[in-house]
Image: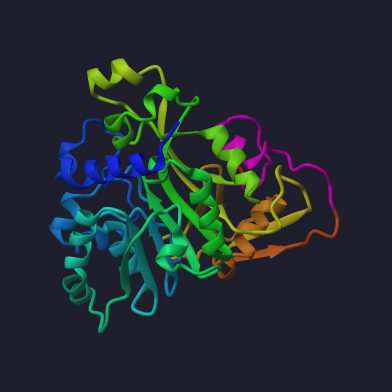
Amino acid sequence: MYNQSITHENLKNYYGKILHGSSDLKTSACCCGTESLPVEVKAALKQIDDEIINRFYGCGSPIPPVLEDCTVLDLGCGTGRDVYIASKLVGENGRAIGIDMTDEQLDIARRSIDSMTRKFGYQNPNVDFQKGYIEDLKSAKISDNSVDIVISNCVINLSPDKHAVLSEIFRVLKPGGELFFSDIFSGRRMPEQFKDDPVLHGECLAGAMYIEDFRRLLNDLGCPDYRVTAKRRILLNNPAIETKIGMIDFYSMTIRAFKLAALEDICEDYGQVAVYQGSIPNHPHYFDLDNHHRFITGKQMLVCGNTAAMVSDTRFAGHFKVYGDRSVHYGPFDCAPASVKAENPDEGGSGGACC
């Protein structure tokens, strides 16, 4: 079992003193390239100070579109790479907040506030870096229902208390707000003997969430439907670590989940139709809500009640027209539960936005 205080101290030591750059990582779990980054993220990335980039650890690109004027909270922000990307994309009237527990990382993030403000052409900074624990956002004075989007990049796996983390996320999110994060997941539950190994934990392996336990945890917190937007198998590329923990399959996954009261635990059919307007910047022809819902611009597409809510009761509402309501129920929607379908996209299909 995890000892939370020991786990936190081990992680502070690993990311504050042992690792001096991404080249010091012993596996590829907490590394990601820039090839598949959205256009606007790549553009912002080119402006970010080298010191921030050189000490970046992450496994994906948890930067969703439609961020202008939003408040974005980055859990485990490290040196602030994703906070500064968000700072650029929310604009001067938005806000980007980073939370981290490691002084050495936060020192780098804060050193760049003035230079990044100038590079982005802002009169005043729109970023804030707070020292704190992602299990306790109240200590960082993050209020209830105050955040539009929570992001995190390969950090939630490190927490010894994931229930507390996710509970705090849904506390601070506004109604209709979004959790959009990249992390390491496993295909089976982690054996206990690995959980206190500082290297395996620091490399984002020992704390990896079994995907079905993650689904159950979200459901317990009132979020019965999440969506996978990207997934790739992790290759450890380290014989010693492979010998230790290679019996477990690891995946880097990017996931979105919304704070919506109307969600159900399977896809239900209310005869609703959604039409994407093609108006999200850099998405003129289609928009992928997840890895099995592609909305073609101008095309009427059948959707389940959950998907209808995700595009009509969130910040995406202005980019979609949704026809129909929940006054008449027609039975289950012709696809698997969204979280299952995301894992098995070849199993059936609705003929609607599922692909």
Does residue 318 appear to the left or right of 241 in the view shown?
A: right
- Of residues 259 and 12, the one drawn nearer to the viewer in this rendering: 12
Does residue 164 appear to the left or right of 107 in the view shown?
A: right
Report the residue at 55% width, 46% height from top. Answer: 227
Residue 96 in view, yes or no: yes
Q: Position of residue 202 (x, y in %)?
A: 29, 37
Does residue 310 appear to the left or right of 304 in the view shown?
A: left
Query: Which residues are drawn in magenta?
Result: 329-353
Does residue 309 appear to the left or right of 10 in the view shown?
A: right
Q: Is residue 336 magenta?
A: yes
Report the residue at 69% width, 53% height from top. Answer: 263
Which secondary structure class fits the magenta region best? loop
How are the colours assigned in the image?
rainbow
In the rendered view of the protein, which quadrant contains the N terminus? top left
Image position of 257 with respect to 149: above or below: above
Report the residue at 22% width, 75% height from top. Answer: 117
- Of residues 45 and 14, the one drawn nearer to the viewer in this rendering: 14
In the rendered view of the protein, which quadrant contains the C terminus? top right
Number of numbered tags placed on the structure image: 0
Residue 256 in view, yes or no: no
Q: Position of residue 332 (x, y in %)?
A: 78, 42
Image position of 119 with respect to 189: above or below: below
Quarter where residue 28 is shown: top left
Q: Position of residue 250 (x, y in %)?
A: 40, 28
Quarter where residue 157 is shown: top left
Report the residue at 46% width, 53% height from top. Answer: 180
Q: Position of residue 69 (x, y in %)?
A: 43, 75
- Of residues 37 and 314, the one drawn nearer to the viewer in this rendering: 314
Q: Is residue 150 magenta?
A: no
Image position of 160 with respect to 262: above or below: above
